[in-house]
Amino acid sequence: MISFKSRLRVIYAIVRKELKISFRFPKNFIATQVMNPLRLLVSFWLVYKSFFVITNNESIGTWSRVNYVAVLLIGTIFYTSCASAFYRYRQHFINEKYWGTIQILLTAPVSKFDFLTASSLAIAAEMAIPSVLYISLLIFSYGFSLATFGVIFIVLYFMIFAVLGLGLIQGAVAIANENYLFIFDYLFAGMICFSCFYYSDSAIPAIFRPLVHINPIFHAVEIARNQIFHHLDGLEVLKKILYLAAFALFAPLAGAIVFRKVVREVGVRGF
Amino acid sequence: MISVDNVSKTFDYSVPKTSFVALIFPKMEKLTAVHRVSLKVQTGEIYGLLGPNGAGKTTLIKMICGLLKPTSGKISIGGKEVYSAQRDIGIMLGSSMIYTLMTGRDNLEYVASLFGIENPRERITELADLLQIGNWIDRYVSEYSLGMRTKLCLARALIHNPSILLLDEPTLGLDPAFALYIRNQIKKIGKTIILTTHYMEEADFLSDRVGIVHHGRLIAEGTPSELKEKIQKRETPSLTDVFIELTTE
């Protein structure tokens, strides 16, 4: 039986290794992490700004000239984190496969669950750079409290762990058969569409709106937006947080089970 | 003891594309890389696995260390299932299994942590001295030559002091003097070893027994002297003569 201390040591070693690889070229890594959200933010800012200028309207629903940049900023933080979490394992496993290093993990006496815990922690740590930066920007620009920072940060990380679970299933498929990865690209497109990062759920046709409301990512974005709009009551926020927390807990577990099964039954193919 | 009992491995592979339709819907065929191989390696024995390129040697090694699951047959290590014996095995698969984006020391520390070695610094220094990579250990692996990478891979395989070593071409890219030094180290290391090599003099010098694999089948097995005795061509046949005689079609 491996002691808890030994498991922690293994998890620490994997996190350290992951971060060392990511920070091999630190300037490039940090600049990319900072730039990714900015690219999207600028595009959507131009669209909404043009709308307000051309139509001379003060608001679209709850989105107004005063708050739309903050709303877009929240959408951007959540979208980029969601995309990174969804694709990180896929990229990670494909790299490891072609570097010829995935064998290290597969031949070491390491629990797959410990490995996945460590990888998720490393990914979460990498994502902290843009998250903290942009949430801080939001706080300073709009005078939000530290409590608001805490709520957005917690909800963001619940969402990241929920999406990492899905990303892990994709990562397992990347190990076994890269031919079917396109399915996940389509799935991601749908998921993004029904997450309403850059628009209100009322923009989705009523027939598809139930898909928005079962999507935990949408609820994460909604809780964050509530810090600006204050359109949800306390009980509603609590319900959404619990719903999201359930996904944050079970999606990685489901991903870990699928990963373990794929590696054992199908094996690593294409290296 | 390593026991390989009637093991086969079949891969599905896509036939090279000749038309647009085949590009989208590739035709899959089966390739038997290892066919009903049985062998036993006793504790402390050095077993040389020889064969032409693509004969199935590396596939067999990968199955023994648990990287590939056999299609049929059974492999056990010291009476245990492969996955339960991973802590006892050190693996070197050519110059792979090292992160080129990290330094040599980072690579060794990482593997040492995975195998639960509490204070790996002493062990890393010991191996760096043994394999003469001390001057390079704190440099990025991407700056290493092939020979340096081979040395690092060997250090990686030895870091947790395993009782079993699976070495796939352990002297690849090494200069002759250092290759000889490594052979001497392997000879006196006192572990159970399966090694593959294309250097016949290496197999002859190191191996207590040799198995020759061809088209996925174990076609000959014995001590180097026993195998040489089977060849009548010359008065003093070498292992190279045995290899050519058995594998040339």
Image: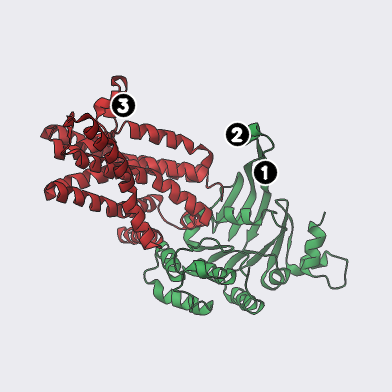
Chain colours: A red, B green
Query: What is the x, y in percent for residue A79?
Result: 31, 41
Q: Amino acid at mark 2?
A: Ile
Asked if badge 2 and badge 1 are on a common chain, one would say yes
Secondary structure of the residue carrying numbered label 3: helix
Percent coordinates x, y for residue A187 in the rendering: 40, 33
Taking B231 as reference, is B184 above or below it? below
Instruction: Name the chain letter of the residue that bears numbered label 2.
Output: B
**Is B14 positioned to the left or the right of B120 in the image?**
right
Contact, mark 2 vs mark 3 (Cβ under 8 Å): no
| Mark 1 secondary-structure assignment | strand
Query: Which residue is the site of mark 2?
Result: B24
Residue visible at 78% across and 57% down? Answer: B247
Q: Give the distance between the C-alpha atoms of the residues marked 2 and 1, in whole angstroms.
A: 21 Å
Left or right: A234 as drawn, with respect to B82: left
Local SS, label 2: helix
Query: Residue at coordinates 40% horizontally, 62% vertically from top-left?
Result: A25
Q: Residues within 10 Å of mark 3 (few under 14, many from 20)?
A: some
| Image position of B106 (left or right of B191) | left
Mark seen at residue A211: 3
Give the labeled residue for mark 1. B31
Looking at the image, can residue A121 be seen?
A: no
Q: For the residues marked 3 and 1, what is the alpha-carbon distance in whole angstroms?
A: 45 Å
Dividing the picture into quadrants, the one containing residue B22 is top right
